[in-house]
Image (cartoon, helix red, strand yellow):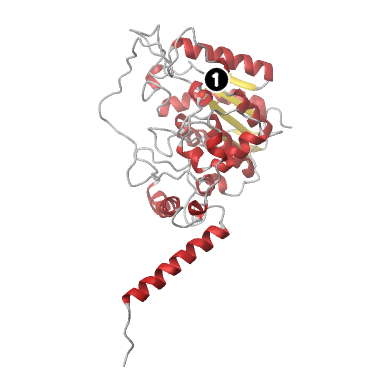
Amino acid sequence: MKPDISPLRILVKALCLFVIVNIVYALIDPQGSIVFGYNALFPGRTRLPFIGGGGPYSVAVDDVDAMFASHAISVRKEPEEYRVVLIGDSSIWGEGLGAHEMISEQWNTLNIPCGDEVIKTYNLGYPHPSVIKDLVILDQAMEYDPDLIVWFVTLNTLMSQRINPFLVANRERVAELLNNYEITFQQSEQFDNQPDFYEKTLMGQRSDLARQVRLEMLGILWAATGLDANVPGGGSPPDFKVTDNPRYRGMQPPDSLKDMLLFSALTAGHAMADSIPVLIVNEPIYVASGVNATVRYNVNYPRWAYDEYRQNITLQMQNSEWNYLDLWNVIPPEYFLEPGLHLGVEGERLLIEQINPTLQSLACNARP
């Protein structure tokens, strides 16, 4: 006679096993990423994974280890490669552009020589304007032997004292950087809270793990299509008109931005790079004309705020003797996808043309 099978007993055992597995996982606290297929089973991505545009090709992954594990920069550096990393926000990531249309991929098609090597650029831009976010990415990028760093900034980058999902997901790294480099951040106490026990369990990490699994599975689509985001096409043209509102983040003249700009983070980035050359680039912005153009440059920036920012960053660059390119108005308005920062394909090409001479003068021409 077969013993009776008690559903309740099975349920209790399963629950106990589930609890034990969660406890063991939390105690072990495995670090790093579960993403391993890129650069092995399928090509590395040309930019960091982001949900941009939504659709079936993208996923929001904020864990910096997983992001880099999926990126082409994780592949072994070739002997003839002069490795340039690009740091910045959504304009560098390539909002509105395909994965093979944005700045790094256009740059790489030029095969620009640098001594006996060839320049190869890696797009490590990531949406969310935040110089602290940039520092986390730069810190990780230093593990991949860059030869030069091109760091794109703008007013919103250096003004950002806001918490975003990337900073939350990497808060232990953020706290370490803020402490090590003595950077004052208005909400720094939020990064000092270490993950509690539940957050270290499988249950606590289920969302992040699920997104990493999805990122791994998307490698198949990436290999087959070369798509990593939905790129909008057609539709109504963007509205390039600006208002007569002079306010910027609740401020207006005679308010000053000077003490709110996080230049200390740029100092930290240079210390982090050590002997690796760093080129700071003030990103091109859309410059409006017509009605209200005397009040605002674009939907993001009133003239008074952006002009003060440019004065302060120029002075900072001169005093610190940093390599700096101010390209704020070099791209004509017709090359922007929308009235802010995002460039179209031809706009990216023009930006490369503006940076190339300085890049080669800074690095390549100095080589034997």
Residue type indicated by callout 1: Met
Q: Position of residue 160 (x, y in %)?
A: 50, 26
Q: Can residue 120 be seen in this view?
A: no
Q: For this view, does 226 lie left or right of residue 35? A: left
**Camera-side residue: 62 or 26?**
26
Which residue is rendered at x = 67% and y = 37% of the image? Answer: 116
| Quadrant of the frame with the N terminus | bottom left
Q: Position of residue 349 (x, y in %)?
A: 47, 27
306 in relation to 113, above or below: above
Badge 1 marks a residue whose secondary structure is helix
Quarter assignment of residue 175? top right
Q: Is the residue marked by circle 1 packed among few (<14), some (14-19), or many (20+) residues within 10 Å? A: few
Identity of the residue furthest to the bottom in this view: 1
Q: Position of residue 315 (x, y in %)?
A: 62, 14
Q: Where is residue 121 in the image (x, y as percent from the top left)?
A: 55, 36
**Which residue, given by chain and number where applicable, does mark 1 sit on?**
260
Q: Can residue 295 be seen in this view?
A: yes
